[in-house]
Image (cartoon, grey):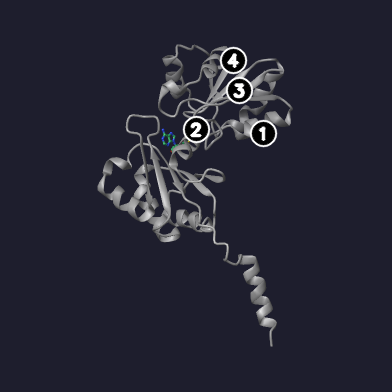
Amino acid sequence: SGCLYIVSTPIGNLADMTERALGVLSQVDLIACEDTRHTQRLLNHFTISNKTISLHDHNEHQRQDYFVQLLQEGKSIALVSDAGTPLISDPGFHIVKHLREHQLNVVAVPGACAAISALSVAGLPTDRFTFEGFLPSKSGARQKTLANLAHEERTMVFYDAPRRAIDTVEDIVSVLGGDRQVVMARELTKTFETVHSDSAQNLLAWLAEDPNQLKGEMVLIIEGKEKDDKAISPEIASTLEILLEELP
Ligand code: SAM
């Protein structure tokens, strides 16, 4: 049977397109794209003419059986998103799950990913990290998300819109404290690429001074909570509490 290729595309700099991605995109029978017009521009740039079909959150379920049929006929499909690696805060999960359940081939053609690129230059621990996807856009929900991560010791990676950066960093200061190290990686691989690392408190002041930092696209990385070896875990604390109540 055929194969679904999960093809990464650049996150800004078109020179990050891989040789293998170009080969796969020109050879497959069909290119499934998050946005066909967006991908058409990429294909035009590399003078690839091939058939495209849309695949987004709203029609992913609908397309499943069609894709199974094509692969069973021996056809190959490439999946691309607007930028970076498909499925990473982008469509594709349902289709990949469905094809795997049908024992069909799904093959990665790796390349750019904003989260991993940001992490690789942030200077925060990378031995363990957690990818948290998009932060909620409303402050209440965002504070709740951050509060749930208050004890997270791993480096935390988020996608967020720079125009909300001040509000987001304000929430980080109020929920996690002003001393937490935060790295803002903006416009990676593009002309105005900026990677700025500071305490949440200082980052806030820096952002307030320069409105240019509120433009484009960004990844936000927050240092994990410092390990406190002497601290008592919440489970042990509540057990102790119960035991203490039993004491005469
Ligand atoms: N699948 C993509 C990937 O692999 O990176 C991510 C798609 S998600 C819909 C788009 C988000 O990724 C943006 O809102 C931003 O947070 C981040 N992003 C994409 N390109 C970026 C860039 N060049 N610099 C910084 N962040 C970027």
Are there few (<14), some (14-19), or many (20+) residues within 10 Å of tag 4?
A: some
Q: Secondary structure at mark 4?
A: loop
Which residue corresponds to mark 1? 97
C-alpha distance separating marks 1 and 3? 14 Å
Q: Which residue is mark 2?
A: 113
Q: Mark 3 or mark 4: name the one nearer the start of the chain.
A: 3
Q: Write down the residue under mark 4.
A: 28
Task: Report the residue that reaches farthest toward the bottom.
Answer: 248
| Side (left or right) of 96 relative to 85 | right
Location of residue 28 (image quadrant): top right
Q: CA distance from mark 2 to mark 3?
A: 16 Å
- Choose mark 1 or mark 3, whichever is in front: 3
Describe the element under mark 1 as helix, strand or loop. helix
Disc 4 to disc 1, how far (Cα)?
20 Å
Choose the circle earlier in sequence order: 1 or 3: 3
Image quarter (top left, top right, bottom left or bottom right) of the C terminus:
bottom right
Image position of 174 with respect to 191: above or below: below
Disc assigned to residue 130 = none
Amino acid type, mark 4: Val
The tag earlier along the polypeptide, 2 or 4, is 4
Q: Do the residues bearing badges 3 and 4 touch, measured as CB atoms within 8 Å? A: yes
Q: CA distance from mark 3 to mark 4?
A: 9 Å
Which residue is found at the position 49% from the left and 44% from the top? 157
Amino acid on which the number 2 mark rests in the picture: Cys
Q: Is mark 4 within 8 Å of ligand 1?
A: no
Q: Within 8 Å of ligand 1, the CB of disc 2?
A: yes
Q: Is residue 181 above or below residue 25?
A: below
Q: CA distance from mark 2 to mark 1?
A: 21 Å
Q: Please say whether residue 72 is visible from this viewpoint.
A: yes
x, y percentage for residue 242? Answer: 67, 76
